[in-house]
Image: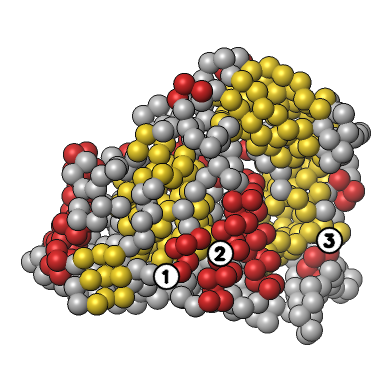
Amino acid sequence: MKTLLVGVDHRSIISLDGDWHYLVDQPPARALYTAEGKVRDNGYALNTHPNIDSGAHNEEYNFATAPTLRVPGDWNTQDPTLFRYEGVIWYQRDFDFQPKPNTRTFLHIGAANYKSFVWVNQKRICDHEGGFTPYDCEVTAALKPGSNFVVIAVDSTREMDGIPSVGIDWFNYGGLTRDVSLVTLPMKFIDDYDVHLKHESSFSAANANRLTGYVHVEGAAAGTPVTLRITEAGVSTTLETDAEGRAAFDVKATKLELWSPATPKLYKVELASGQDGITDDIGFRDIRVDGTRILLNGKAIFLQGANMHAEAPYRTGRACTDEDVNNIFAFLKDLNANFVRLAHYPHDERMERTADRDGIMIWSEIPLWQHISFDKPEVYAKATYMLNEMIRRDRNKASVILWSVSNETPNNPTRTQFLTNLANEARRLDPTRPITSAILGPHLQGNEMIEDDPLAKALDVIGQNEYIGWYLMRPEDADNIKWTLPQKPILLSEFGAEAKQGNHGGEDQRWAEEQQVNVYKHQFVMINKIPQVRGLVPWVLMDFRSPTRNIPKLQDGFNRKGLISEDGKKKQAFYLFQKAYEERSVGKAE
């Protein structure tokens, strides 16, 4: 059984993080796949051991004497021989466990890039496709008292019909890149919940005191009691599940302070049903679009932020620890940012949790990036599943204000219909947040930049990517560019230039920090002339690895558009944005 438990990081767990034995399954990965491409349930999955004394042997492998990789973590930065490896690696770990009567146990995997296959005690448990969202495999029937083992095969091979597809401009970090744990629950348990400020047709601060949502109890019969308690907000009520195990509610809070970057208030939300209970930290706020404005709790806001990949500062590799996230948020706070776009995939849940606490608003997206097979129904099914996983995990995070369905996709009718349907699916799953996407292709007529991508009709907020002064025209040309854009809130979702930290020269010298600053200064002139711009999201907060960036001594395998180098050194452009954000000198909220 594969499911997705909400709030695992707020439950009592048995962590399986640490050292796991690993074996490399070189392409064509014969230990995992048959000649017909089917997954094998024998071989490495059985975790047998060669009998050295008798001469009897298995398929000539042995996890017991194999080297180890740290979990969570990518394999690329832990073993130099695996730095550019894309393929299958097998992970194995022994663990002790004592099953409890009348309980169910799940193996929680925070993320595994890109496909993963799970066996416990030689039994195939579940599979998962998608490298950036969590999943939970029920292992109750496979566990036994005492010593147990888990084997997970992770395949990072990029595929034409994968999401993302084969052409990506970021490093393809493979492995068990987020936490792995065991979660034991009663036979009937809370697996999903949604607790949010009621999204009325119009916002009124005076009446912003109703909370609504649902609690789902897996295995519960109709009429099963569920309690909802938010003591500090004066909420205490008992609900009943319907025939599907879902208990909806609409309650009034006697005291409620709304979440915002200035006051990132979180409440202890206690949910209980039968023998199960969970406490989560949730903030309540209203986010909506009004014409060309973005309103937070009824007030127009301007988003001052940056893009970022899930790249660990200083050590590089996939960001997956508290230290990684704390370092990233220290950069954002020093920048005076109130917003971050988590590009181009759902990041570690620590990101949203920290953003909730620190008051940083988030754009979260699934990895539909450029070369997607938009004409294939099975790819749409994958995209819908990934969207569901992202929203289900993070819908209770106040910091997440935008769901994004894509980045830089080709303008054609097939793509437009695919993404329009996906945007509507996002609204069905969560009608309380605006939907966005980052659009790339405006066309230039004289000195007028025209954005008429029909996908804009499906979006509430439009992300506009552009690189005037770097890939297109000269920096000073931006001063006189006139933009024709839809009458919706516009975020400059990507703009910038590359500079190697410490490389200095004139303002027109490519790759110099001074030239990066010059590009941004002219961008500021242009942006202040576009009335519907409601946010700045320069590309990118920190330099990140990309296999397509191959200019030695300047790139060395990194995209150098960061305001900060991969080892944490701030470029001149960082201080330009720091000052602009402090003074609020670029862009207006309305």
The percent position of residue 443, horizontal first and vertical second, equals: 31, 75
Number of the label disc, if any, that sits on residue 420 = 2
The percent position of residue 497, horizontal first and vertical second, equals: 25, 65
Number of the label disc, if any, that sits on residue 124 = 3
Label 1: element kind: loop
Foreground disc of the pair 1, 3? 1
- First in sequence, mark 1 or 3: give its number: 3
Residue 541 in view of the camera: no
Q: Is residue 546 left or right of residue 61?
A: left
Structural distance between the alpha carbons of marks 2 and 3: 37 Å
Structural distance between the alpha carbons of marks 2 and 1: 12 Å
How many other residues sit within 10 Å of disc 1, few (<14), some (14-19) or many (≥20)?
some
The percent position of residue 39, horizontal first and vertical second, equals: 79, 73
Residue 226 higher or lower than 549, as above or below: above
How many other residues sit within 10 Å of disc 3, few (<14), some (14-19) or many (≥20)?
many
Closer-to-camera residue (47/84): 84
